[in-house]
Image (spheres, rainbow, N blue to C red):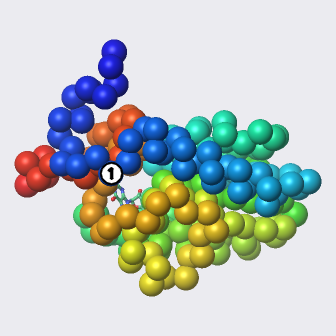
Amino acid sequence: MDQTHVEGDLELDQTLFTEEQIRHRLGEMAAQIQADYEGQDLLLVGVLKGAVMVMADLARSLDRHVEMDWMAISSYGSGTKSSGVVRILKDLDTDLKDRHVLVVEDIIDTGLTLSWLIANLRSRGPASVEIATLLRKPEAQQMEVGAKYVGFDIPNAFVVGYGLDYDEKYRNLRCIGTLAEHVYS
Ligand code: IMP
């Protein structure tokens, strides 16, 4: 099946990044990560569910050993705004003591969820904690989240695809785009 013609694509207002652009940028990020962590062990921590695609492609772009672990967290908030009050639904299986941890994220919006998560992970005695995110919105820059690896800075619009959902849909799109207004109005 031609994946550029999946049903969801018809509901996209604008494609921001094609599959090819995403793959290319993740390759560049992987090269940087590989250089920075040379000679060190590396644990990739993904946040479910949005980071699944980024994790899968970023990890496969790394030509070295990595471990992967996952957390599921829920952020209490109203509608599409997160509040920064977070509950762990699934914790890591890995002990972080003295580990080099790289949190792999799909998007940083307000940064509230991530700043809570980073503080939580830092309290577990890791050797280091850094963040790699495919997307970052401008608002995120107002919070001190400090992502070391950022794929693309994007405008303040709601985006879907490549792991990102609207009402649990569109995660399986290969590209990233903005939703057509008729979908949510
Ligand atoms: P934050 O705490 O405001 O940074 O939001 C974190 C989470 O909100 C992300 O991990 C996403 O799951 C979700 N999110 C934020 N912006 C978008 C978007 O544009 N599309 C889909 N999900 C988003």
Identity of the residue drawn at 34% across and 25% down: 3
Residue 96 location in percent, x, y? 79, 59
Among the 4 quarters of the image, the one containing residue 133: bottom right
- Res. 82 in view: yes
Which quadrant of the frame does ligand 1 lie within?
A: bottom left
Extreme-right residue of the structure = 39
Identity of the residue drawn at 62% across and 45% down: 27
Q: Residues within 10 Å of mark 1 (few under 14, many from 20)?
A: some
Q: Quadrant of the C terminus?
A: bottom left
23 left or right of 42?
A: left
Q: Disc 1 on helix, strand or loop?
A: strand
**Front-most of residues 98 and 92:** 98
Q: Amino acid at mark 1?
A: Leu
**Front-most of residues 92 and 127:** 127
Among the 4 quarters of the image, the one containing residue 81: bottom left
Residue 80 location in percent, x, y? 28, 63
Identity of the residue drawn at 46% across and 45% down: 21
181 left or right of 155?
A: left
- Res. 92 in view: no
Residue 66 location in percent, x, y? 78, 43
Among the 4 quarters of the image, the one containing residue 18: top left
Q: Relative to 59, does residue 157 appear above or below in the rendering?
A: below
Q: Quadrant of the N terminus?
A: top left
Q: How many marks?
A: 1
169 left or right of 98?
A: left
Q: Which residue is mark 1?
A: 16
Identity of the residue drawn at 79% across and 60% down: 36
